Image (cartoon, rainbow, N blue to C red):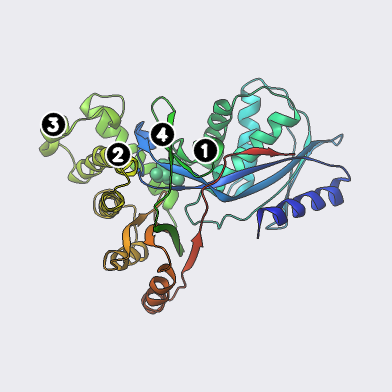
Amino acid sequence: MTNESLLEKVKSSFLKRFDTKPVLSFSPGRINLIGEHTDYNEGFVFPAAINKGIVSGIQKNNAMLCSVYAIDTNEVLEFSLQNMQPIKNGGWKNYVLGVVAEILKRDKTIYNFDLVFAGNIPLGAGLSSSAALENSVVFGLNEVFELGLTKKEMIYISQQAEHNYVGVQCGIMDQYASMFGKEGNALLLDCRNLKATYFSVDFKEYDIVLINTNVKHSLAESAYNERRSVCEAVAKRLEVPVLRDATYEALFAIKEEINQDHYQKALFIIQENERVLKAAIALEKKDYVTFGELLFESHNGLQNQYNVSCTELDFLIDQARQNPDVLGARMMGGGFGGCTINIIKKGTADVFIDTIAPLYHKQFNKTLSRYDIHIAQGTYKIT
Ligand code: GAF
């Protein structure tokens, strides 16, 4: 579905349900070129907003409750601002409730409102539909109630919503990319001070193609939180605030004293931070071969050290490694399913996917999906 038809859908649904016009906004999903699980270690990431996202329409109401309608699932959520709490297995509802609760925590005044939203980000694909939803809600409420929040305050609200209402102790990458993305640019983001350097992304005779495994393994969320705890434990052992501050020397020095699995995970974070910086230099120099190699190395670490990949993702990366038209590929996002990102020679993706799809189906009894994304602007009001 195109973004134009999404917009029309939200507009007409809002008018039909609430008989008025809403304030409309668009928040995109994101890709990440490289730098996985580094954000919550205050390290470096290299994401970009994409041309798939969520359109939301919000308006004040005179009713006794807030009312939210999710067009895609045809579900309704009604709640009172005076009595807010997370819903067990609430799915998208907790993203909305969480954002509202975080706004209220900051002593901002909002009144009852109606919200309708729809999206075209494939769910569970590692493209951050959750951050897009959070950002679109906080952005829309900020407009409607003139809260005066800055974009940085908004992304922290989105992140805290996820921590406190969804239970995922996520970093800031997804919310940042979805809010601050820029057409045609990836953001080299330093997650310590939230300073971003924008890099124009053009791989010349290569394209970015995403291949979705169409799997999302259960326990992905608890595994994510566990990874974060391991990083925090090793940082504590090293007596540094976060693994961003850890050095190879310090980590080697305690190697024999700590759990080897923890050692590998901490080592991965130090290496991945280094890879992001090397990737930025490679991109600047238009050295796409080195850039691609760094992607493969990143996957190797995510698979064997950080243990957040899965057999379906590894299968796709093994196939990519064997294909001379693919400069680099890796799993993308939190892991345990979702998409791989591939830097592949223009015009060759069809053949690549047509070749591997039957093998993939034979081995996993699943189909693959392909997305050709466009790097686009971050969250904005639709006027
Ligand atoms: C998920 C999280 F939400 C991000 O903060 C980030 O940690 C990512 O996984 C892994 O890099 O998308």
Q: Can you say whether 13 is above or below 326 in the image?
A: above
SS under mark 4: strand
Can see residue 186? Answer: yes
- In the rendered image, residue 307, in percent from the top left (x then y), is placed at 29, 52
Q: Ligand 1 closer than 8 Å to the CB at disc 1?
A: yes
Drawn side of residue 342 relative to residue 7, left or right:
left
Q: Nearer the viewer, mark 4 or mark 2?
A: 2
* Proximity of marks 1 and 2: CB atoms separated by less than 8 Å: no
Identify which amino acid the numbered label 1 is placed on: Gln
**Which residue lies under the disc numbered 1?**
175
Q: CA distance from mark 2 to mark 3?
A: 24 Å
Residue at screen point 68% across, 47% down: 55
SS under mark 3: helix
**Considering only order in the chain, which callout, 3 or 2, is on the residue closer to the N terminus?**
3
**Considering only order in the chain, which callout, 4 or 1, is on the residue closer to the N terminus?**
1
Density class for disc 2 (Cα within 10 Å; few <14, some 14-19, many ≥20) is some
**Considering only order in the chain, which callout, 2 or 4, is on the residue closer to the N terminus?**
4
Drawn side of residue 192 relative to residue 138, left or right:
left
Q: Nearer the viewer, mark 4 or mark 3?
A: 4
- Quadrant hosting residue 204: bottom left
Q: Nearer the viewer, mark 2 or mark 3?
A: 2
Identify which amino acid the numbered label 2 is placed on: Ile
**Which residue lies under the disc numbered 2?**
281
SS under mark 2: helix
Front residue (pair 245, 27): 27
Q: CA distance from mark 4 to mark 2?
A: 14 Å
Q: Which mark is residue 189?
A: 4
